[in-house]
Amino acid sequence: MPSKPLVVGNWKMNHDYVEALHLTQQIGVVLKNKSREHVEIAVAPPSVDLRSVSSIIESERIPISLAAQHVSMFDNGAHTGEISVAMLKRLGVKSVIVGHSERRSMYGQTDDIVASTAQTAARGGLEVLLCCGENLDARDAGEHFSFVSNQIALALDGFEKKNLELLTIAYEPIWAIGTGRTANSEQVAEMMAHIRLELNSRGMSDTRVLYGGSVTGENAAELLTSGQAGGFLVGGASLKVESFMAIVEAVDDCYAKNR
Ligand code: PEP
């Protein structure tokens, strides 16, 4: 494992700002009772919650960072409905999810848009959680490695070398997202190795590679050790404090034992 594992909770379009505040406070209470020093934690609330979550993280000194679920590929201007990197930075946002399969499939985020968004975010100083992962057809056809390589190549095309350290890759096979069907640890391990080879060939040997797809407190340790994941991007299980902190706890214990 190149660095401390990272666990990111992607709340998607769940929790209004009151619920988001409550969940953030609950996470803070758990971490106050038992600190988790072997894991980095981030939460990605809906955009309208970022201001309140940011304030509570700061005022209660909760040791987690703030991620956004989306950012515009443009710096500013006439882009109705969009949010800029500068706006996110002003709110204390540290990182942003780019290229999530839900945005690719439901909101027309093409590989070109993913690449431009990643570049804009990094240029403005945000860390980029770049998602990749094959659909079931590609997996069944045995084309999952080339599918993911291609996504990474297209996303990194034109990415400024000096910003590469701002990148984290999240491997999220689409067939495992929100389905309860987790990739098994061999499938994760072989994809982690494949992605690391790709990254090494670009001089990115220190880049973290996360796994995402139906991660729970029960499967997290196995996916971290046998699966060799560098942490997790968590959807469904991040919506409740118990299930999210069960993953954090499993990762923290596991990293403390195996490092
Ligand atoms: C995700 O959407 O990034 C995700 C991993 O979701 P889930 O954990 O619910 O599969």
Image (cartoon, helix red, strand yellow):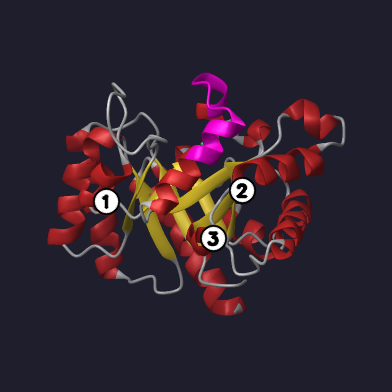
- Residue at the image position 57 percent from the left and 43 percent from the top: 131
Q: Amino acid at mark 1?
A: Lys
Which residue in the protein does label 1 denote? 89
**Marks 3 and 1, how far apart in space?**
19 Å
Report which residue position mark 2 lands on.
156
For the residue labelled by badge 1, is the local secondary structure a helix, a strand or a loop?
Answer: helix
Left or right of residue 123: residue 161: right
In the rendered structure, which amino acid carries the disc numbered 3?
Leu
* Above or below: residue 135 compared with residue 239: above
Report which residue position mark 3 lands on. Answer: 164
> Furthest-left residue in view?
59
The Cα–Cα distance between marks 3 and 2, rounded to whole angstroms, is: 9 Å
Question: Is 161 in front, or is 62?
Answer: 161
Residue 74 vertical position relative to residue 200 in the rendered view, above or below: above
Image location (x, y in percent) of residue 85: 32, 44
Residue under the image location 59 percent in, 47 percent down = 158
Q: Amino acid at mark 2?
A: Leu
Contact (Cβ within 8 Å) of mark 3 with mark 2: no
Measuring from the top left, give residue 162's x and y in whole percent. Answer: 51, 64
**Magenta residues, start to end:** 104-116
Count of numbered marks: 3
